[in-house]
């Protein structure tokens, strides 16, 4: 008889796990708190515009290919490589810096401020690339049975990378580059981990290698939400059932096993195996009531920054904006050091703007653009009150208008704002943290909440806060790791 699997949550980690498990003959059901599938990888459709709610691009595109190869289906997604990768605007400088993968072009971009850039970048990326390839299979694409198992694995990483564990990404950049602008731009990858370069260990310079050399950045033709709609179509054809607007608040246990998940309104969902795609740390605390994850202990963990997001449908074309843009001030260190641990909104915010109507004209009516603005802000531990959301949005829109020379405010057709409160409430993101648990060395690998439960033998986890970590390709890797565990414990059905 087929074994049944209940997935709690329908984020990418869950959808990818469901795909893999159906291939092995499991009978899968997905229960989701929100009204639509995808979790953070979601969509807002309003007044003729559509917006990617969260992710707008990704690295390691080959992980999506691996996923569809795994189930023997041709990849239904048409991926577009970002070229240039993005543009960066510094306050007071009229022209943005374009981030090119072609290092000769990149050198030209910085010719007046960082001499011999190509040579310096090659040396820097060479070291980052070695680190990536020396750790990818040992640290990222591995299940760990214990902390000891993880530490044993780490001993296989060549010793020469050791110092990068102990210094920050910023110090590594200071060793390699002279100009502030180059250091700041190369350090932006730390924000993809939801942190700052001053807190992020230098090992993550490997992300510069993934963006500039290895596989670059990609988005999806038709919008990022296509990832969800295409996977959902395949799952439904395979008989997977989806239940929306249903939050699981309790797990019924018997003889060391999870026997059923109970929803807020009291429905009981039985299954042979349960996979939790809700946050792997806060679910253990809030739903399983584990003493290792009380509210106080959860608050003591390192969480990634919260997103403050604005979705604007704008009349007219903002010719000065590129597809992916960063708008920065000129007090980077001071900003990064202070802003994320205060209870006040920044008065000169740093932010990212994506205009997906540039490559997907269907996302906005003709003669209009859809702007997605993301400003990293303190999580709800530091700033619980977001009644100033409208003011912060207005500050950002005013700043953007000035910097691109277009009166955005008078041309807004539609506007949606999501503060950390909405991000928390919509998707159960702990304290509104955007990317889940942070990726310091004490919270990765064997030190991250495991993808197999400590107490219940048929309960597993997939998603941003379990191994290997956050980001779209990384949770796809996580779906492979959790599937391996399930197959090891329960076998293939056919
Ligand atoms: C603003 C923003 C921008 C981002 N940009 C990028 C990017 O450009 N590139 C990139 O690679 N990554 C990006 N990320 C990160 C990426 O979105 C995540 O790492 C990834 O989507 C996490 O997937 P997940 O599997 O953990 O599921 P999640 O997205 O966390 O989904 C989990 C689902 O579980 C549901 N759920 C939670 N608790 C329960 C419960 N008790 N009962 C039922 N359902 C429950 C939630 O409602 C949610 O739908 C971004 C994230 C944010 C917030």
Image (cartoon, rainbow, N blue to C red):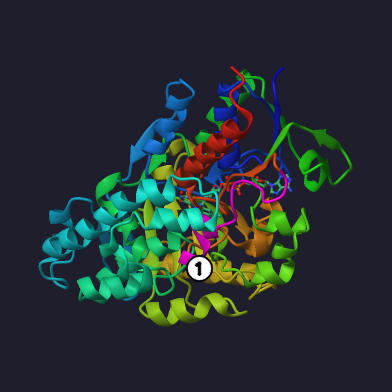
The residue closer to the viewer here, 301 or 361, is 301
Label tally: 1
Q: Is residue 154 left or right of residue 464?
A: left
Q: Work out whether 88 lies above or below 112.
A: above
- Place of residue 95 in the rendered image (x, y in percent of width and height, measured from the top left): 26, 66
Q: Mark 1 Cα within 10 Å, few/some/many (few <14, many 20+)?
A: many
Q: Residue at x 13, y 67 (%)?
A: 111
Q: Residue drawn at (36%, 48%), measured in percent from left and top?
A: 136
In this view, the residue in front, 339 or 406, is 339
Which quadrant of the rendered structure holds the N terminus? Answer: top right
**Quarter location, residue 333:** bottom left
Determine if residue 242 is in view: yes
Magenta stretch holds residue 442 = yes
Residue named by callout 1: 396
Q: Along the line of sight, which residue is nearer the eye, 328 or 61?
A: 61
Whether residue 480 sits left or right of residue 427 in the image: it is left
> Label 1 CB, ligand 1: below 8 Å?
no
Tell which residue pokes out farthest to the right in this image: 266
Q: Residue at x 48, y 73 (%)?
A: 349
Q: Position of residue 444 (x, y in %)?
A: 49, 59
Q: Which residues lie in the magenta part? A: 440-456
Q: Is residue 445 left or right of residue 296?
A: left
Q: Secondary structure at mark 1?
A: helix
Relative height, residue 307 to residue 12 (above, below): below
| Residue 369 appears in view | no
Please tell me whether residue 107 is drawn above or below residue 140 in the rendered image: below
In the image, 92: left or right of 364?
Answer: left
The foreground one among 108 and 48 is: 108
């Amino acid at each position: 008889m087929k074994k049944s699997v209940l997935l709690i949550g329908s984020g990418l980690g869950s959808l990818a796990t469901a795909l893999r498990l159906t291939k092995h003959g499991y009978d899968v059901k997905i229960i989701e708190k929100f009204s639509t599938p995808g979790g953070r990888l979601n969509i807002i459709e309003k007044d003729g515009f559509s917006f990617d709610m969260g992710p707008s691009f990704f690295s390691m595109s080959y992980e999506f290919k691996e996923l569809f190869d795994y189930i023997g289906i041709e990849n239904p997604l048409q991926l577009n490589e970002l070229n240039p990768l993005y543009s960066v605007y510094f306050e007071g400088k009229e022209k943005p810096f374009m981030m090119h993968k072609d290092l000769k072009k990149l050198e030209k971009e910085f010719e007046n401020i960082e001499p011999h850039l190509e040579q310096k970048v090659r040396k820097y990326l060479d070291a980052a690339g070695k680190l990536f390839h020396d750790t990818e299979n040992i640290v990222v694409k591995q299940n760990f049975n214990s902390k000891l198992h993880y530490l044993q694995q780490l001993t296989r990483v060549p010793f020469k990378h050791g110092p990068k564990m102990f210094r920050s990404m910023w110090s590594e950049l200071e060793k390699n580059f002279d100009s502030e602008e180059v250091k700041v731009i190369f350090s932006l990858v730390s924000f993809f981990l939801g942190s700052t370069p001053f807190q992020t260990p230098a090992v993550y310079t490997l992300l510069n290698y993934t963006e500039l050399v290895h596989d670059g950045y990609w988005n999806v033709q038709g919008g990022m939400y296509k990832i969800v709609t295409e996977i959902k179509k395949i799952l439904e054809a395979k008989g997977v059932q989806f239940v929306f607007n249903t939050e699981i608040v309790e797990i019924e246990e018997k003889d060391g096993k999870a026997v059923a998940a109970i929803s807020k309104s009291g429905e009981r969902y039985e299954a042979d195996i349960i996979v939790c795609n809700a946050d792997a740390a806060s679910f253990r605390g809030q739903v399983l009531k584990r003493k290792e994850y009380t509210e106080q202990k959860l608050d003591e963990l390192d969480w990634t920054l919260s997103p403050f997001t604005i979705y604007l449908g704008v009349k007219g074309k903002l010719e000065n904006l590129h597809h992916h843009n960063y708008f920065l001030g000129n007090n980077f260190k001071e900003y990064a050091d202070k802003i994320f641990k205060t209870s006040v909104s920044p008065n000169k915010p740093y932010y990212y703007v994506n205009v997906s109507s540039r490559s997907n004209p269907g996302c906005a009516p003709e003669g209009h653009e859809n702007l997605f603005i993301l400003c990293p802000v303190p999580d709800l531990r530091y700033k619980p009150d977001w009644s100033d959301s409208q003011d912060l949005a207005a500050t950002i829109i005013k700043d953007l208008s000035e910097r691109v020379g277009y009166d955005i405010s008078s041309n807004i057709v539609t506007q949606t704002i999501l503060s950390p409160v909405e991000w928390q409430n919509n998707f159960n993101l702990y304290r509104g943290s955007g990317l889940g648990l942070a990726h310091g060395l004490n919270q990765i690998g064997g030190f991250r909440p495991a993808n197999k439960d400590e107490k219940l033998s048929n309960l597993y986890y997939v998603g941003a806060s379990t191994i290997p970590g956050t980001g779209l390709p990384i949770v796809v890797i996580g779906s492979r790791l959790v599937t391996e565990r399930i197959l090891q414990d329960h076998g293939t059905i056919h």
